[in-house]
Image (cartoon, rainbow, N blue to C red):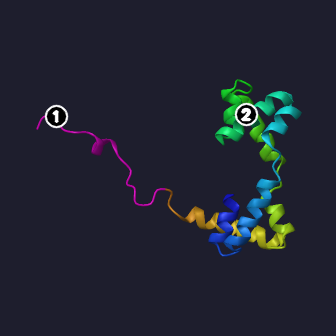
Amino acid sequence: MRLCFDLVEGGYITAAQALSVLDQHLASRTPIGQLAVENEYMTMSQVFDVLAQQTISNRPFGELAIELGYLNRLDLGRLLLIQVEGSKPLPDLILQEGLMTQIELDNAVHERKLQRSRKPAHAGVLPITGSENQTSSGT
């Protein structure tokens, strides 16, 4: 997502184009329930239980699966990683949509990295030294 924000902020693509690419990226993700069954973390029956609860509570699938005891946090983390790794990469979608060429994209990414590296990490925040942090006990 950071890539899209950087490209919009840098004027390389419009906000509407970024939203379109992000929508495609999210749509390319395999649902967690499907991944849980494919990777043998849950049964279909358990997935249907979670989906039924989801219609009532409108809470995230993973949160409900943990609450119902079908997954633990580590399992959910593994499934989320599989989900992200299986989705279409943002650069590929940007190129596929013809929004930029590979060279334009590479140059834009490089330029944004340079711009970020020139900004101080904590502008306006002064470091605390040991002597400034101590109070005098004798006064």
The local crowd at label 1, few if under 14, some if 14 to 19, many if 20 or more residues have their Cα within 10 Å, is: few
Residue 41 in sight here:
no
Residue 81 — which label?
A: none
Q: Is residue 71 left or right of residue 42?
A: left
Q: Is the stretch drawn in magenta largely helix, strand or loop?
A: loop
In the image, 90 versus 21, the foreground residue is 21
Residue assigned mark 2: 76
Query: x%, y% of residue 37?
Result: 86, 32
* Quarter of the figure with the N terminus: bottom right
Look at the image and say whether residue 128 sits in the magenta stretch. Answer: yes
In the displayed orientation, state which residue is furthest to the top. Answer: 69
Q: Quadrant of residue 69?
A: top right
Q: Amino acid at mark 2?
A: Leu
Q: How many numbered badges does the structure rendering display?
A: 2
In the displayed orientation, state which residue is furthest to the front. Answer: 56
Question: Residue 38, relative to residue 13: is it above or below?
Answer: above
Residue assigned mark 1: 137
Q: Quadrant of residue 116?
A: bottom right
Q: Amino acid at mark 1?
A: Ser
* Quarter of the figure with the C terminus: top left
SS at circle 2: helix
Look at the image and say whether residue 133 sits in the magenta stretch. Answer: yes
SS at circle 1: loop
